[in-house]
Image (tube, rainbow, N blue to C red):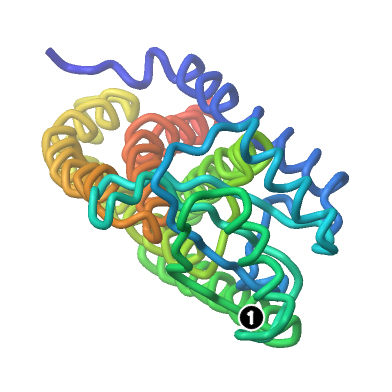
């Protein structure tokens, strides 16, 4: 069975809008409401601060989390951000990890001791498993470097696509990259609002990887279109050539994406909690990248070619 992408192109464009609009709305809302005025909730990698993680031998309910937050505030800890991380491993009988993010504090200081004492009063024999601190200056520098890396990667991809293909193909591929990045950022913006999910330097790494994967898939489709145009441009319409090219590369695209997703899903469910958000960004990005290469970028090129012919 062959897919008729061209015939249903406006349906796929509408589906893209449905996928993107909630995330865009969440990013706008986040920009307005967050103290940092960022579209996503940023972690201490970028804002500066200290995160302490305590392993506990019980499941932490939302009510218990509220009690801990209240106890921390009464103990003089300003605006603590709390998160529950569920543990797959039963090592040391730990069932949950309580993550507490607060302003920058020195390791081993009285402020850290104060937090530890409060956690000890709320849980039975908690274990301090990790302390991570980033200064405000270093956090801002890391944020700037991340944005520079992202911008340079996009400029390099744009330059290559413009050189490799004609302008309308390159523009469609670039819009596909924006489409994929907006979707991933939008989902994480929603997760930040609903579940306090924060982004860090690993998120930018995942975003760069997703962009590279997406453009690679798009180039494969466009290369096949260009090859088919050489031989069938006088026998078939551009829409028919586009459909044939997509169907010829469809199996390859799906096989590549599915095998990658299987590995990522194994990492997500069986891997460590510290890389879970990174893996989730990769899963979302590869799934939407496969979709955009087949159903979004190709339909944009077909629409532009139709306008040229009319």
Q: Is residue 164 left or right of residue 244?
A: right
- Look at the image and tell me in which quarter the N terminus lies: top left
> Which residue occupies the foreground of this view, 136 or 224?
136
| Residue 42 placement: quadrant | bottom right
Q: Which quadrant would the C terminus be assigned to in this image?
A: top right
Residue 144 pos. (x, y %): 67, 79
Q: Residue at x 40, y 38 (%)?
A: 288
> In this view of the protein, which residue sits in the foreground, 251 or 190?
190
Taking the image as shown, residue 94 lies to the left or right of residue 58, namely left
Give the percent coordinates (x, y) of residue 205: 44, 67
Q: Is residue 230 visible?
A: no
* Residue 109 placement (x, y as % from top left): 68, 85
**Which residue corresponds to the image point at 66% horizontal and 72% vertical from the top-left?**
46
The quarter of the picture where residue 164 lies is bottom left
Whether residue 229 is visible here, answered yes or no, is: yes
Query: In the rendered view, does 190 fall on the left or right side of 293?
Result: right
Mark 1 neighbour class, 10 Å CA radius: few under 14, some 14 to 19, many 20 or more: many
Using the image as rendered, state which of residue 226 and residue 101 is in the foreground.
101
On screen, 92 above or below 152? Answer: above
Residue, disc 1: 134
In the image, residue 202 above or below residue 22:
below
Q: Viewer-proximal residue, 38 or 116?
A: 116
At 58% across and 75% down in the image, what residue appears? 146
Measuring 18% from the left and 36% from the top, which residue is drawn there?
254
- Tag 1 secondary structure: strand
Image x and y of residue 83, in percent:
58, 48
Please indicate whether residue 165 sits to the left or right of residue 179 in the image.
Answer: left
């Amino acid at each position: 069975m062959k897919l008729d992408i061209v015939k249903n192109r406006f349906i796929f464009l509408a589906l893209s809008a449905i996928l993107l609009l909630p995330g865009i709305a969440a990013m706008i809302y986040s920009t307005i409401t967050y103290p940092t005025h960022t579209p996503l909730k940023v972690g201490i990698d970028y804002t500066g601060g200290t995160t302490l993680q305590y392993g506990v031998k019980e499941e932490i309910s939302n009510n218990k989390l509220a009690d801990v937050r209240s106890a921390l505030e009464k103990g003089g800890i300003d605006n603590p951000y709390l998160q529950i991380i569920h543990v797959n491993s039963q090592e040391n009988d730990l069932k949950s990890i309580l993550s507490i993010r607060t302003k920058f504090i020195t390791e081993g200081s009285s402020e850290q001791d104060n937090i530890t004492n409060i956690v000890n009063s709320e849980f039975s024999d908690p274990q301090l498993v990790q302390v991570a601190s980033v200064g405000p200056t270093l956090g801002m520098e890391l944020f700037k470097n991340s944005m520079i890396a992202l911008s340079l990667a996009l400029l390099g991809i744009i330059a290559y696509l413009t050189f490799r293909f004609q302008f309308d193909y390159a523009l469609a591929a670039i819009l596909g990259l924006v489409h994929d990045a907006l979707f991933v950022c939008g989902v994480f913006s929603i997760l930040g609002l609903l579940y306090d999910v924060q982004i860090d330097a690993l998120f930018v790494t995942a975003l760069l990887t997703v962009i590279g994967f997406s453009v690679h898939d798009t180039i494969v489709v466009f290369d096949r279109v260009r090859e088919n145009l050489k031989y069938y441009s006088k026998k078939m319409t551009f829409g028919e050539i586009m459909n044939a090219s997509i169907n010829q590369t469809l199996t390859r695209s799906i096989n590549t994406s599915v095998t990658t997703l299987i590995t990522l899903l194994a990492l997500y469910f069986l891997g460590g909690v510290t890389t879970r958000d990174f893996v989730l960004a990769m899963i979302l990005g590869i799934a939407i990248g496969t979709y955009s290469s087949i159903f979004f970028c190709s339909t944009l090129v077909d629409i532009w070619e139709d306008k040229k012919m009319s």
